[in-house]
Image (tube, helix red, strand yellow):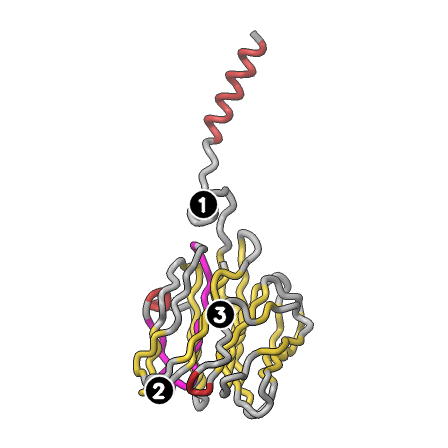
Amino acid sequence: MTRVVALLLSLILNFAQGPSLPYPGHGGGTTPPVTFTFQQKVTCNQAVAAQCNFTITTTAGRAGIILTIGSSNHASIVSITTNAGTWNLSPGTCQVVSGVGAWTPDCAWIASETACVACTIGVTMTCASCNYQGVYAEYSYTGGTPTLDAAVGTSVNTSCTSCVGPALTLAGTSDVIVQAVSACTGSGAVSGNAFTTPAWTQSVAGIFFSAGSAVNTSNGGSPTWACSVDTVAMEGLALK
């Protein structure tokens, strides 16, 4: 009799708790996806030097993304020196070292920064006689540790006014994406797909560099940049 009562109680408890439902796009497991919140961004514009430096106060445990574009077909990232943590360099295919129009996109990311007040994130490049533009963006997150989902760079050797950025094939359902364009002499406004309502945008007057971000999206479709009959370099990186 005691065993029957215990069995009935166990069945009642299991029914009350309900099944563990999988989260779509995350391997059918019960772990929720990482979700992101934008915190801050900084741009760099370094003329004729091998450094693109960002001065920033970082917060422990936040994710960071850096996109750079250099004025040479071999102006890629060599190293990142900082007390804010160890960065992952040139993931995926974001580095295009044989880009046309003498522009090289490149990128880096970090899942969990170290706290650092008035920190310099020093991005060393391969070409000391080149110009560099770049953006650093920081995001807090919940639900786990971010991982790389996609990173793609491209150069366009035909003039474009509505310049189509690289599409990112995403496995995640709530990614953070940063896209950038350089040598775009138009407004640099971004639109389309996840960038119809971007989390932030940045156009730097005088250096023709623009960037933007989307958060908590599964849409990795190409953004469109408003340029002015330009040959451009573009890139995008997504964390999930």
Q: Considering only order in the chain, which callout, 1 or 3, is on the residue closer to the N terminus? A: 1
Crowd tier of the residue under label 1, counting other residues whose Cα lies within 10 Å: few below 14, some 14–19, many 20 or above: some
Q: Considering only order in the chain, which callout, 1 or 2, is on the residue closer to the N terminus? A: 1
Q: Which residue is mark 1?
A: 23
Question: Where, by quadrant of the figure, is residue 192 drawn?
Answer: bottom left
Cα distance, mark 3 to mark 1?
28 Å
- Amino acid at circle 1: Tyr
Do labels 3 and 1 touch, CB within 8 Å? no
Residue 206 horizontal/vertical position (percent): 44, 91
Q: Which residues are magenta?
A: 173-191
Q: Which residue is mark 3?
A: 93
Tell me if residue 184 is in the magenta stretch: yes
- Amino acid at circle 3: Thr
Residue 209 horizontal/vertical position (percent): 44, 83
Q: Residue at x 39, y 71 (%)?
A: 166
Q: Which residue is mark 2?
A: 230
Q: Mark 2, mark 1: which one is toward the viewer?
A: 2
Q: Mark 3, mark 2: which one is toward the viewer?
A: 3
Residue 79 horizontal/vertical position (percent): 63, 76
Q: Is residue 100 left or right of residue 59?
A: left
Crowd tier of the residue under label 2, counting other residues whose Cα lies within 10 Å: few below 14, some 14–19, many 20 or above: many
Residue at the right extreme of this rendering: 83
- Amino acid at circle 2: Asp
Q: Residue at x 43, y 54 (%)?
A: 173
Cα distance, mark 3 to mark 2?
23 Å
Q: State the residue in front, 108 or 101.
A: 101
Q: State the residue in front, 105 or 110.
A: 105
Is the residue 153 above or below the residue 229 in the image?
A: above
